[in-house]
Image (spheres, coloured by chain):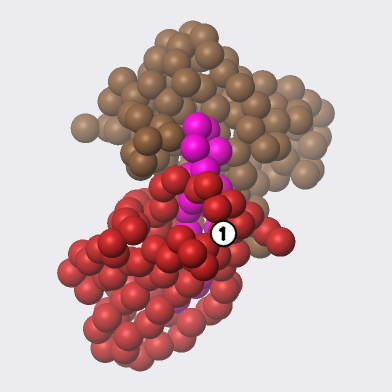
Chain colours: A red, B brown
Amino acid sequence: RKEVEQDPGPFNVPEGATVAFNCTYSNSASQSFFWYRQDCRKEPKLLMSVYSSGNEDGRFTAQLNRASQYISLLIRDSKLSDSATYLCVIEEGGFKTIFGAGTRLFVKA
Amino acid sequence: DAGITQSPRYKITETGRQVTLMCHQTWSHSYMFWYRQDLGHGLRLIYYSAAADITDKGEVPDGYVVSRSKTENFPLTLESATRSQTSVYFCASSGNQGRGDTQYFGPGTRLTVL
């Protein structure tokens, strides 16, 4: 089993749609969780951290399920500008940070 | 306001040549990282550094050398480039790695080895 697994997509959705991504991780001792966004040919940038209680930032909601070892990202009211690759990032502690291969999202007019 | 920069942004070289990729950050972050990103793979850690003069291997260190004589600089050297090292290389820095702090990435260097 891979340490971090994401559905590569692509997810093709119309503007205004709600879309959700999941990411599973294998190490139950993982400590910190993040979603990063990466635009085509650009560097990854932090989208949001993921907390056990779940957290929201505008149209974006992130959740962590430690029992089932996954994190999720929900995007409501999708915009064209949301088109990007979303990377799941798991910190296992110390210097071990694992990046998922990413889920590609295309939002169409 | 530079943040973290990388140079060159694009590089084409030949098999067997030595290549050095530069990374510079202006935040005085203690932690710095080098990753490579290839199609179908997530970012893979090559080397990291916890402070000046402290470096350690990541997941894929073979064929690479790093140094960190100053906090702000973290150069990555390919001693004898191979075609398998064709990739996009990202440098990153963090103020408080391992404690939930985010990593900030440079714009990347696209390296092609012919």
Residue A106, x across and y down, in percent? 43, 79
Figure check: B67 above or below A107: above
Looking at the rendered structure, the secondary structure element under dot 1 is: strand
Q: Residue furthest front?
A: A67
| Quadrant containing the N terminus of chain B in the rendered view | top left
Write down the quadrant of residue B11 in the picture. Answer: top right
In this view, the residue in front, A65 or B36, is: A65
Q: Which residues are magenta?
A: A86-105
**Dot 1: chain letter:** A
Total residue callouts: 1
Write down the quadrant of residue A49 in the picture. Answer: bottom left
Figure check: A80 above or below B54: below
Q: Main secondary structure of the magenta part?
A: strand
Write down the quadrant of residue A47 in the picture. Answer: bottom left
In this view, the residue in front, A99 or A107, is: A99
Q: Residue at x 28, y 62 (%)?
A: A53
- Whether residue A98 appears in magenta in the rendering, the answer is yes
Instruction: Please name the residue that numbered disc 1 is placed on.
Output: A25
Q: Amino acid at mark 1?
A: Tyr
| Quadrant containing the C terminus of chain B in the rendered view | top right
**Residue B80 visible:** yes
Q: Residue at x 38, y 21 (%)?
A: B30
Residue A10, x across and y down, in percent? 53, 79
Residue B38, x across and y down, in percent? 64, 53
In this view, the residue in front, B50 or A63, is: A63
Q: Residue at x 44, y 45 (%)?
A: A31
Q: Is A91 positioned to the left or the right of A45 in the image?
A: right
Q: Residue furthest left?
A: A58
Residue B106, x across and y down, in percent? 41, 39
Q: Is A63 positioned to the left or the right of B42 in the image?
A: left
